[in-house]
Image (cartoon, rainbow, N blue to C red):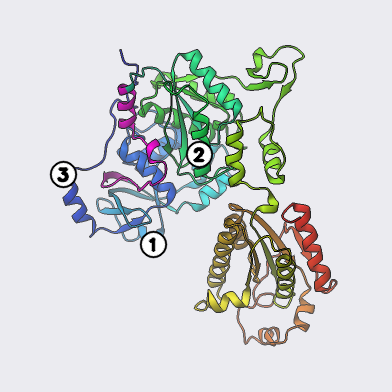
Amino acid sequence: MSTIPAPHGRILIDLYLHGDDLAAEKNRASGYPAWTLTDAQLSDIELLLNGGFSPLTGYLNRKDHEAVVENLHLSNGLLWPLPVALDISEAFADGIQPDTDISLYAPEGLLIATLRVGDIWLADKTNEAVHCYGTKDLGHPGVRKLFEERHPVYVGGRLRGISPPPRYAFSRYRHSPRELRQEFSRRSWGRTLAFHCSTPMFSAQIALAARSARQQRANLVIHPIVDNGQDALVDDFTRMRCHELALREFPEQTTMLTALPFSSRLAGPREALLHAIIRQNFGLSQIIIGSHHASPDHGHFDTADAAREFVQRFANELEIEIIPIEETVYIEERAEYLPLSEVPANATVQQLSSEELERRLELGLEIPQWFSPPDIIEEIRRARPPRHRQGFTVFFTGLSGSGKSTLAHALMQKLREQGDRSVSLLDGDIVRQHLSSELGFSRAHRDLNIQRIGFVAAEITRAGGIAICAPIAPYRETRRKVRHMVSTHGGFIEVHVATPLAVCEKRDRKGLYAKARKGLIREFTGISDPYEEPEQAEIVIDTSALSAVEASNRIMLTLEQLGYIR
């Protein structure tokens, strides 16, 4: 008798059109208003179309959305822990209305689906934050970024699937819920245990997963998240290669690896509950709820135990079994991993925190062999070289005439002298001439100019080079965005050139300050437009007190202290 659970809601949803219906809808879609899906929206729509989000047949309308946010159930009473709505811009919302159709495209231009619009409403992000995250201020930076990136208007409605989102990497590990259920049947796998991973598996996780599968007499299914960008440690591609290596540590005939396209909400226990429902839809009979399901640092759910207890409260509304686990640690005397409850008295327990792992990777220090299979660490080191081999960006900001360009050129010369990495200078005036010549000096155009500089700097950093940027960059929020763009790929060092305004005016060879004071130049930074000083710059320099040589030497010393140069 099969133990493959029924889908949530008893029906496995498949929203893809076929045959004449598909051809007709593709023909009509060219006349619909078109929306280009974000990466996060692509992951959501993939699970909506293939049944991973069963029983949903599209994006939640307002009544269901509010019921889920406040009560963790759809308006019909069925358990559903997190809202799924299409977020769109106000401009796009102005051009659509209920009972009309829109086309949904991947960024590359492939038509993914059409949507019969249901409700359209202004998102209440505060209410969502209070109920789903237990907070009003979204204190965790990842959650805050997630909410900031969402568009302000939500749309609900039923989907009609045209084509799966294009997924070119690791296709051999991608299964729809129907395909995975068929694979279990083909292999005659009855009891299956899902091990959810959002980071690489190290020896502790490998030992825990293997032990749990043996205890449950279940086949192990390693089911990592993909298409989710980058976790705190490595990118999607490196993480999947690490999972391939981890798979070698398990018996070939009893374990498999399959990937889950999922856009994380960082919603702690509510997200853990959603993961359980998704795995039930994929046909898995059991799931391990672990530390990866704990809330980041907000609300009152902050441990893996709390997440498990939360999910267990809804066990009678699920057909997937929640498997309790215990932290596994390395025992030096026995050279093996054991659950904490089985650790002998006076035994030497070895543990390596995620913070310590990151520190050792940054500095190129040894990772103990007991912590991980060596080939997994080698894979991670390729993606996370020590700081002195990483790319980084030095971002100068300050008033016109503060000395940014002079310092940037001096620093460029010193770094090129070392010769171990390429060095690119993105000076404000040069960028204006070659990258942003069509832009004016309104706040919107200045923001766009800085974001262009940030994009180029991020690409240089990602390629292992050094980018030196020297714009005025007067606004904190824009600088924060640039920091985030670059920090995803390497180091970001902000240098506030805090030369006093009076000194900057005296140095003004072009007479710009004088023209600004006479009202001849509008929105001039420091005179008629504010300069928002950095609050946490890595380096602060006043060039009225330091020569260019002294200041550039101070920057080089800081780069050395931070580990970016030797």
Which element carries disc 2, helix, strand or loop? helix
CA neighbours of label 3 inside 10 A, class few (<14), some (14 to 19), many (20+)? few
Q: Nearer the viewer, residue 470 or 73?
A: 470
- CB within 8 Å, label 3 to label 1: no
Give the label, 3 or 2, closer to the camera: 2
Which element carries disc 1, helix, strand or loop? helix
In the displayed structure image, the side of residue 512 where residue 43 appears, left or right: left
Three-letter residue code for mark 2: Arg
**Whole-Å distance between the Cαs marked 3 and 1?**
35 Å
- CB within 8 Å, label 3 to label 2: no
Q: Nearer the viewer, residue 446 or 231?
A: 231
First-in-chain label (3 vs 2): 3
CA neighbours of label 2 inside 10 A, class few (<14), some (14 to 19), many (20+)? some
Residue 320 seen in the current view: yes
Three-letter residue code for mark 1: Ala
Three-letter residue code for mark 3: Gly
Residue 200 placement (x, y as % from top left): 55, 35
Residue 289 placement (x, y as % from top left): 52, 25
First-in-chain label (1 vs 2): 1
Is residue 178 part of the magenta span, yes or no?
A: yes
First-in-chain label (3 vs 1): 3
Q: Name the residue that disc number 3 marks.
A: 19
> Magenta part of the protein: which range?
157-186
Q: Name the residue that disc number 1 marks.
A: 91
Residue 137 seen in the current view: no
